Structures are given as C-alpha cells and as structure tokens.
Image (cartoon, helix red, strand yellow):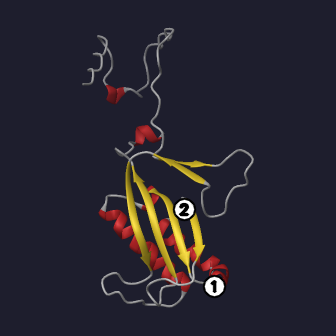
Amino acid sequence: MTAKPPAPPAGARPASRRHAPRAEPRPPRQAGTVRPTRPAPPLATLRPAGWAAPQGYADGIAASGRVVFVAGQVGWDPATGAFADDDLAAQVAQALANVVAVLRTAGAEPQHVARLTWYVTDRAEYVAARRAIGIAYRAVMGNHYPAMTLLVVHSLLEERAKVEIEATAVVPDRPATAAQQG
C-alpha cells in the first residue's frame, strides 16, 4: 500500500508552469527539505577511474528497466534464411538489423542495448574489415556503444555465417520526458 503524495500548498503553481519565470523571489529552503532529483538515465556507462577510454564499446553499463534478450542473429535474410553476401561487414550489417528487428518487437530501440556478444569465425578477416564493420555498425546502431565482447570461434551452425551477434537490452520503465532529460 502506498501513501498518497501530500496536497500542494494553497496558491502553488501547477506542475506545467514549474519552469515559468517567477514574478516573486523564491523563499529560502527550509532545513531538512529534499530537492527533487532527475531520474537516473536508463543506461549509464561504467569506466573505472584511470582506465583509458575504450574504442567502440563501453567497459560496463548500469541499467534499470525491463530486460530484453535477443538470441544470436546471423547475417541472413530472416524471412528466407538466405545469405545475400559473404562479405563480413555486410553480414554484420544484416545481423545487427536482425537484432534491431527483434528489439523493436519488444518495444526497444538500439539505444536500449546494454550488451552485445559477437562471435566471428576469422580474426584476421575481422581485423582487416574493422573500418567497414564500424561503418555498418553506425548505420544500424548509431553512435551507441554498449558493453561488447567479441569471440573468435571455429565455426557457426549456419555454414555461410561469418558472424553471430546476441544482445541484451534494457527498456526504461517509462520513457523520459524532455523535462527529465534536461
């Protein structure tokens, strides 16, 4: 059982005018009063003090909200199961697009992704294609860089798959309003 919030004092301004210019000076705050704070962002990047900034990922993410798990997605057309390309960057773009499609089914967007795990079959090919992969990543995910892990594996179940990407997203309990953002 939750208590009802106290009624506003007589003559208080409605909440919608809270940021309007004040005609009268603000009364001094009384000791022991609590100033309202902004809610924490749904995803916050974590980096221990003294660590260098990572390139293209976050060291850690703290999040609160509804968790969405996306199984590993490969770079094929999910309607047909056919690969359009054997190029690693093209498969990354398609695998990420597949991840985003699943996220949107849950009401999530790329900026809600807290973690990505990548499985690639060829380290040398990945390193050689990093620039093209970065371009493909930003085209699908924007400039959002969650915690990421990349593993080199012997092979994937789908014979032509060169990459498989799984995701964990956290959808905020309620969307932030413009006033809450800043």
Q: Kindly state the secondary structure of the residue where label 2 is placed.
A: loop
* Amino acid of disc 2: Asn
Q: In which quarter of the image is residue 128?
A: bottom right
Q: Is residue 45 above or below residue 92?
A: above
Q: Position of residue 144 (x, y in %)?
A: 53, 60
Judged left or right of residue 10, residue 167 is: right
Q: Residues within 10 Å of mark 1 (few under 14, many from 20)?
A: some
Task: Find disc 1 in the rendering and name its residue.
Answer: 125
Question: Picture coordinates of residue 148 (x, y %)?
Answer: 56, 63
Residue position for label 2: 143
Q: Which residue is drawn at 43% across and 86% down?
A: 158
Q: Quadrant of residue 94?
A: bottom left
Secondary structure under tag 1 reads helix
Q: Residue at x 35, y 27 (%)?
A: 17
Mark 2 residue crowding within 10 angstroms, few (<14) / some (14–19) / many (20+): few
Q: Nearer the viewer, residue 84 or 165?
A: 165
For the N terminus, which image quadrant? top left
User: Given this view, does label 1 or label 2 mark the residue nearer the observer?
Assistant: 1
Question: In 3D space, how far apart are the residues under numbered discs 1 and 2 (Cα atoms)?
Answer: 23 Å
